[in-house]
Amino acid sequence: MIMSQPSITILGIESSCDETAAAVIQNGKILSNIVAGQDVHKAYGGVVPELASRAHQQNIVPVVSQALKAAGISKNDLDAVAFTKGPGLLGSLLVGTSFTKSFAMGMNIPLIEVNHMQAHILAHFIEEKNNSENKKPSFPFLCLTVSGGHTQIVLVKDFFDMKVIGETIDDAAGEAFDKAAKIIGLPYPGGPLIDKYAQQGNPNKYKFPHPNIPKLDFSFSGLKTAFLYFINERVGKEPDFIEYNKFDICASIQSTIIEVLLSKLKKAAAESEIKEIAIAGGVSANSGLRRALELEREKSGWNVYIPKFEYCTDNAAMIAITGYYKFLKNDFTDQRTSPSAKYSM
């Protein structure tokens, strides 16, 4: 007689920056994934930590309620609750951690702490109902993890055996996108707008320097400075320069950032002799980066794994799937846990 496996249902909660998110995963399959953004930051040109934490307090209960309702389950069906311990904004993390600890205690279910950057990588293992493809990378694989706060190349040997083999020594690629957008007067968040306008521009129109950083590490501070000086010089000579050349400017700076990312990733793949290549993080939603990876796949014979858009930016599905695999290992924490703004992977 074949015994059916008991279902494992995990609630995931994400609150590391300015998205309040909750998701439900059952046996690795996504049942719901709810995200509440925060428009309040647009007026300030960037995330204001105090305003972010206040918005999380307002959003977290309704978001969790929506996630449970959309999944078609009751809170009594949950086997554990996973949350983002860090890294991130401490005030934002505190809201998610405090709520999750209280929820777990009230429901008498296990508590699972999750590293936000690990979760971005494990988003590749989320399964969707009625989707027979569900392509997942095979171990070991390399993951280029790119967001507003992080830029890393990670060697992934197993679900929780990961090693950062290259990372930014200063600014992240996502921050470089947003800074470049701010310099040319685009509203926050500017990274997606650069991607949008770049699709209509010439990526070879303007040349920007590539940082000469040893090994597999990155640097974007020099590129940001060079871009600022370039724009100031051109606008000084031609006040309408940005308006008339916006598409080419966006295409050129985006192309440069992608070239920097891909050059290090190609070096890492050659040195490790690994052809299983994945990307993760908010910048993995960038269409230019996705196209560049597909081209490299054809050129180098890589097996490329690109997450769906909803699993690129901050979301709770990635927290829930990480919690699921931790649950299988009985890797739980207790009520003494606390958030960590700089939580090392």
Image (cartoon, helix red, strand yellow):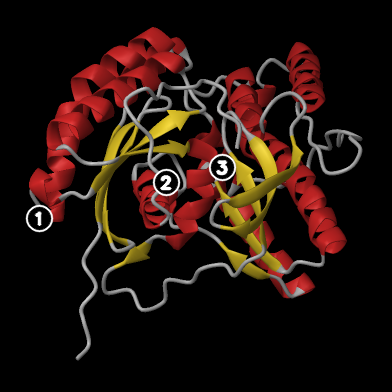
Lower position in the chain sequence, tag 1 or tag 3: 1
- Mark 2 crowdedness (10 Å alpha carbons): few <14, some 14-19, many ≥20: some
x, y percent for residue 126: 39, 60
| Residue type pointed to by label 3 | Val
x, y percent for residue 155: 70, 53
Residue 328 lies left or right of residue 101; in this view the side is right
x, y percent for residue 229: 80, 17
Quadrant of residue 140 within the rendered picture:
bottom right
Task: Identify the residue at horizontal 27%, vertical 27% (top origin).
Answer: 101
Quadrant of residue 251 within the rendered picture:
top right
Lower position in the chain sequence, tag 1 or tag 2: 1
**Up-down: is 268 above or below 88?**
below
Badge number at residue 331? 2
Q: Which residue is mark 3?
A: 283
| Residue type pointed to by label 2 | Asp
Between marks 1 and 3 in the image, the one whose residue lies nearer the viewer: 1
Q: Which residue is mark 1?
A: 72
The secondary element bearing badge 1 is classed as loop
Q: CA distance from mark 1 to mark 3?
A: 32 Å
Residue 228 lies left or right of residue 319; in this view the side is right
| Residue type pointed to by label 1 | Gly
Between marks 3 and 2 in the image, the one whose residue lies nearer the viewer: 2
The secondary element bearing badge 3 is classed as helix
- Mark 3 crowdedness (10 Å alpha carbons): few <14, some 14-19, many ≥20: many
